[in-house]
Image (cartoon, rainbow, N blue to C red):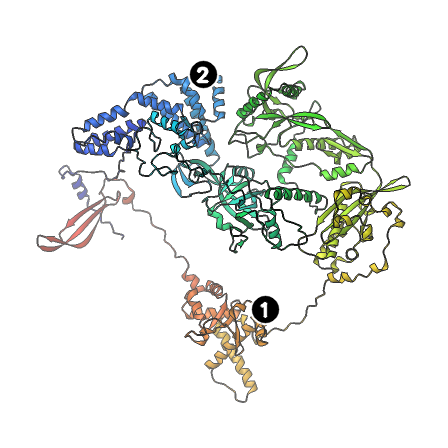
Amino acid sequence: MNTPYYPFPSSYASDLLSPNAPMTCIQSTVKLPTMKIEPFDGDIEKFHMFFEQFSSAVDLNQQLSIIDKHVYLRGYLKDEPACLVDGISITAETYETVKNILKNRYGDKNRIIQAHLDFLENITPVSNPTPLSLNNIFIECNRRLQALTALGENINAYGRILTPKILRAFPNDVCRRWIIHAKREKISESDISKLREFLSEEVEGALTTLKIKGEQTDEFCALPCTAAFNVNSKTQYKPKNYSKKPTPFCPFCNVAGHWPQECKSVTDIDVRVQKLKTAGRCFLCTNKGHNVRICPRKDKAFCIKCKRKHHVSICKNSNPDLTPLTTANQVNIFASNVTHLQTAKVFITGPTGITKLTRCILDGGSQSSFVSTRLVDVLNLKVISTDNLEVRGFESHSSETQPRRRVQLELSSIWNKSSVSLSAFESSNTYAPHQTVPTDITLFARQKKLKLADPYEKTDNWPIEVLIGADFYWTVMTVKPPKKLTESLVLMPSIFGWILSGSRSMTNIKFDKTSAIQNICTDKVTLQKEDEDVRTFWDLEALGIKVSQEKEMSTLNREILKQFHDSYKVIDGRRVVNLPWKKDRSLSSDNYDVSLQRLKSLQKKFKNTDFQNIYTELMQDYIDKNQVEIAPETPVNESRTFYLSHHVVKKQKNNNTKYRIVFDGSSHSPGHQSLNEVLEQGPNLLPEILATLLRFRLHKQAIICDGSQAFLQLTLSEEDRDATRFLWFRTEKDADGKTHLLNDILIYRFSRLPFGLSPGPFLLSESLRELVSKNSDTYPLAAKQLEGNIFMDDFVMGVCTEDELQLSILSSERAFGAVLYIRIQEGKTTKAQLLCSRNRLSPLKRITLPRLELMACLIGARLLNYICYNTSLDRNAATLWTDSTVALSWIRGDPNRWKTFVCNRTTEILDYTTPSQWRHCPGSQNPADHISRGISPIELSSLDIWWDGPDWLSQHPDNWPTESDSLKEIPQCKAEARKTKVQPLCTATFQPVINASYFSSYTRLLRVTAWILRFLNNCKSKHRLFQELTSDEIEKAKDYWILVVQKQCFSVEIKALEKSMPLPAKSKIARFNPFLQENHLRLGGRLQFAQVTSGEKHPLLLDGSHHFVQLLIRHTHVRLHHLGVRIVLSELRSNYWILRGREAIKRVIHGCLPCRLSKAPRGTQIEAPLPADRVTPCIPFSTTGIDFAGPLYVRNSKSLDTAYIALFTCSTTRALHEHLWEN
């Protein structure tokens, strides 16, 4: 209600402010929050703050009695303090006694100082060193130090004790920088005051960097409470520095980091009980200061093993069958059973378009989804937010809260284009090994044409790096029914394919046998190994016969190549290379601690004198050849400083043992990245090994050479050398030149490219290619040979020869393959020699033998093309032999004559060969016949026709097999010939007398049609009509247009019903069970026995896309006064059933102009500026508005009188004053 203002006269304001005005008590109109005193639970560090608050609010309050103060004090005590004064009665005399007891117990200055010192000595290191966690631990340490200073303690006196303890809580990088800072500033490393200043700058710098990068730094954030694999994702809003989670502490070994029941140092139950008694701890909760009788948890806590009132760590009735649960997805199962988790292979795509293959697990018991930190960093996934995540394991007594990134990712199927977008938290957990899909289920899925989401492959070592929880579980699953294999094993449908889930014994899944299946293994271990061996064999057999696909180099790899060539520099005849660093990644740790620990472990192995001498000689060789150098004290770039670990590898060949020191670029500190993870690997520039070996085998005289220490021939740039630091002992040589190790440890770094870095192969290969390219004009012959015959640092070549290729091909119902021979001319003698062969098993799906023979021809053509492309052999000089007359006729014919299967394969064959190269040979003289039939290795070793080919292959071509005239006409070829289809050119459609699309009015269309029908009737009949149109004529016109719509839209269905034939399977009205009644198509429906009209039982079928139907809908909409979709549809369905009627009505109403105008947004008027009295500061009620409310009925003694409320409001401050008026 807007009430007008009535300004008071100025005399009224002066009366209110005059000295003679009556004095009133003015109270603040601002409502302060209620002061809340936190109950005191016995924490000695909080007693001073508690007692000051209590004294201010209660003890010094004169309006309270002593009894009230005592009651308040006892109400603010809990746990140990409450038990301490529990026996004292609440009286006025005992109030001071209770206060003195609490002061003496918890107010002791020495005890408070000792509590602060205990915290600083036992401070827990930061598990996840983020800027926020470092800020929290710094604030806590600084608070303790300030408290000690306030208590009069000289904190620098504790420097040598507390400084190492405080630094232990911070990451290694911060400790190292403090030591460097102390030496640079020439201050003591134990100066706590300087340490506080240094840590303050470090933390503030980290927080500022976090803000500059734009990451979330709000004071409050969503804190999902989650448990690994059993996740409770109820979101609570808590501060980011929320640290209420309990810190694990063991009272038995007095070490933080694990719970009492997890202690491995003290395992004897009696010893544990004695330690609790000695320390004065509770047997139920293991805390100090009380016993089980007064334990605050005695009503809720009990032993989970025996259900008694004691802690589980001292339970003597432990169940030997009880298996402790962990947060890993690995459980103990019976030896005869296997449990399959719901896993799937998926492609994960990042925002940059990079896609990687990984494995995911679907877990309905987890309420959040997770993705590995490695994938987040590698794919540079988009970070949605950074949330504090509390993780709890099933039946776990501990939880872990730490900030985690929530990222956006896209998962897609390996079979099709199905994909799903979801958000997940990052996780650094390593999941347990995965149980692969057995062969019997794989074969069952192939026979039933089911695509498994996690098919078994040779490279089945993909880790589980994505967990899909209940938040996206049903987004992935589909509505198809699952397929039950056994009582406890099913295949569940998902967008990734069929997911195997459940438990099974080692009995096999039954399915129909095919000719390709000989037997089924029942031993799980043997089955998996044989599967892997067989798959490896067939992968090798596929080399050279796969469809060649030229892979375009990615934009990133092209940029790496460009940077490599732009940085071209040669010093002392050696190419200087730079390490390719990733732009979005940087080293978070220098790995010094890991490198030092690995060196100490290596030193233990030096007890073996021979091993020490070998290792020392290899390392001294690096030093003597100046391949490594002493690292400077200050790195060139601290952000690119890394310490490599190293070990020795042994390679034994021909009774010779070679040793090589390998530097591990993949080692890293826990929670940090390795050097290889922040370096780009670079493009793979190595040639195919099969092509290299074939080129090597073609020559009679072979040449092989190997570059000595090829990686160490490349000079490493000065700015990248600190990334290759490593630790080694100081050495000295005696008079005999023998190297001895000293105890001192020195820091070395590489001046050359070390062996063990991920970009090493790329840098070496591209350096050799660059060397060949730049010297191609000076040494053209050498450059030509080096260009395609270098594999890493090995060079293989030979002398060229003039040879011819002969390819033999054959197929059977079980297998098919091709054998390639090379004919070598040595003087007047011609010799044939096996060069290469490839074979494949026939598909599980049965296909005809001629088609299998054609597939064998295709394999032979691909193999010929691969070998000729990678060698100097002439493809056009090759001859291809097959004993299949049908396949030979298909190849020699026009591919467009044949059906799709034959057409596609003959087209590809003719891309590699010409029809004149194909010839026919008898099956008994075809070496490939042994591929299709199978042969044992012993028989194959002595089979001359396999190794040397048929006898006529070494003779003159005039003696080769010739074709007979019967091969020219092959009747079997007609089975694959395309059938010519003749399409009719003339079609007949029903045409109305006028075009309905010329009309925009339903009524006008019907009247015009009625006049036309009358004219036609007058032309035929002697009884002509001349009066106005009747309703019957209008109704006939409407029936005519309904008939037009049905014949134009449902002509096929009407013809089928007229001939009493079933409707087409793809008919859009087949589900309505239509029928003809008086030449009109009506809906069958299920309302035959309903008490409704005939039109409602069987409405006329219409198509909503026809123009007449749209005019009918618009007419009904206007007739119903522009009502909505539901009313119009209900009205129309009393006589008509319109296909997709709701959509048609929505389109018509959307185009209705009156409806659009009525729904248009209303105009709004711009508000005028506020009056000057509303915005000018002045004394309250200088300008006042007045209004009355009423009448109200007021009882004065016995009479009932009327009264009014006078409401005075200040126009500036909005202050209110109320007054009751009698009239």
Mark yes or no: residue 64 visible: no
Depicted 240 relative to depicted 936: above or below: above
Depicted 216 relative to depicted 852: above or below: above
Which of 440/1035 is in front?
440
Depicted 896 relative to depicted 1219: above or below: below
Residue 18: x percent and y percent?
Answer: 16, 38
Residue 454: x percent and y percent?
Answer: 57, 47
> Residue 1064: which disc?
1
Mark yes or no: residue 812 visible: yes
Residue 713: x percent and y percent?
Answer: 69, 25
Give the residue pinned by disc 2: 187
Question: Which comes sooner in the sequence, label 2 or label 1?
Answer: 2
Which residue of the protein is positioned furthest toward the top in this rendering? 735
Location of residue 963 (image quadrant): bottom right
Residue 884: x percent and y percent?
Answer: 78, 55
**720 to the left or right of 94:** right
- Of the residues shown, which amino acid type is indicated by label 2? Ile
Which of 1103/724 is in front?
724
- The residue at 52%/56% (across/down) is 481
Q: Secondary structure at mark 2?
A: loop
Decide: few, some or many residues near mark 2? Use Cα within 10 Å; few <14, some 14-19, many ≥20: few
- Of the residues shown, which amino acid type is indicated by label 1? Pro
Q: Between marks 2 and 1, how big is the CA–CA gap?
A: 95 Å
Location of residue 897 (image quadrant): bottom right
Which residue of the protein is positioned furthest toward the bottom in this rendering? 1022
Which of 775/64 is in front?
64
Q: Secondary structure at mark 1?
A: loop
- The residue at 49%/48% (across/down) is 473
**197 to the left or right of 6:** right
